[in-house]
Amino acid sequence: MLNEKMKNALTDQVNEEFYSAYLYLSMSAYFSKIGLKGFANWMMVQYKEEVDHGMKMFNYILSRGEDVKLHTIKEPPTEWESPLQVFEETLNHEQHITERINYLIDVAEEVKDRATYNFLQWFIDEQVEEEENDREIIDRLKFIGDNGNGLFMLDRDLGTRTYTPLTNEEA
Ligand code: FEO
């Protein structure tokens, strides 16, 4: 059993995570379209990670004996001005997700739900890592500026990112 407010907030977060997946999938398509295959790969890995986050949240609600009523996923944008703009939007979005996770923790504390409080700690750590990754790429993109060679090298680096599924304990 979950407190109603807690359950609703967690269900909203399932939607937030799946929207994140959609957003990054759309960004991956954008990068493919402009010929940056490494960037497209990086975003495709990010898409898969967001699906994992959504599923982790979904499975947790079920594990507490609740049903899950899924909401409509809104349509993501499809066009950006530059790789830098994409990553600035990515960082903004992740900061929004961090605020959402902090809100969930506030609710867990408010309703004294220790199990959910503990469950959410994994997401806190994940958000720190995600924001850090985005900042690092933004810094590199700013440093590169209009240098085509630099962009080519970054594209090659981002192409090496691989997807690692969550372990059984993490999922
Ligand atoms: Fe699921 Fe990127 O936070």
Image (spheres, helix red, strand yellow):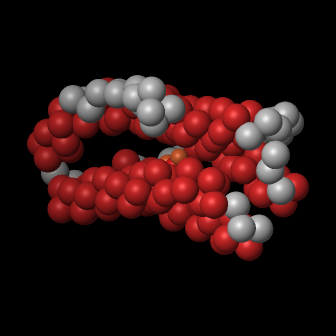
Residue 60 higher or lower than 2, as above or below: above
The answer to whether any part of residue 3 appears in the image is yes
- Asked whether 62 or 33 is in front, the reply is 62
Q: Is 112 positioned to the left or the right of 86 in the image?
A: right
Tell me: residue 99, above or below residue 118. below
Query: Number of numbered discs present?
Result: 0
Of the pair 170 and 158, the residue shown nearer to us: 170
Left or right, residue 74 beside residue 146: right
Seen in the picture, residue 147 relative to 68 is either above or below; the reply is: below
Relative image position of residue 152 (x, y in whole percent): 18, 37
Residue occupying the point 26% across, 58% down: 136
Of residues 127 and 36, the one nearer the viewer is 127
Query: Quadrant location of residue 143?
Result: bottom left
Residue at (62, 65) in percent of width and height: 105
Q: Quadrant of residue 38?
A: top left
**Could you tell me which residue is drawn at 34 percent across and 28 percent down?**
164
- Expressed as whole percent of the image width and height from the top left, the position of residue 142 reads 25, 62
The picture places residue 25, in percent across and down from the top left corner, at 53, 32
Name the residue rendered at 71%, 67% in the picture: 112
- Residue 26 appears in the rendering: no
Residue 40 or 151: which is nearer the viewer?
Answer: 40
Q: Is 113 placed left or right of 50 in the picture? A: right
Query: Can you give x and y, in whole percent of width and height, for residue 75 in the image?
Result: 72, 39
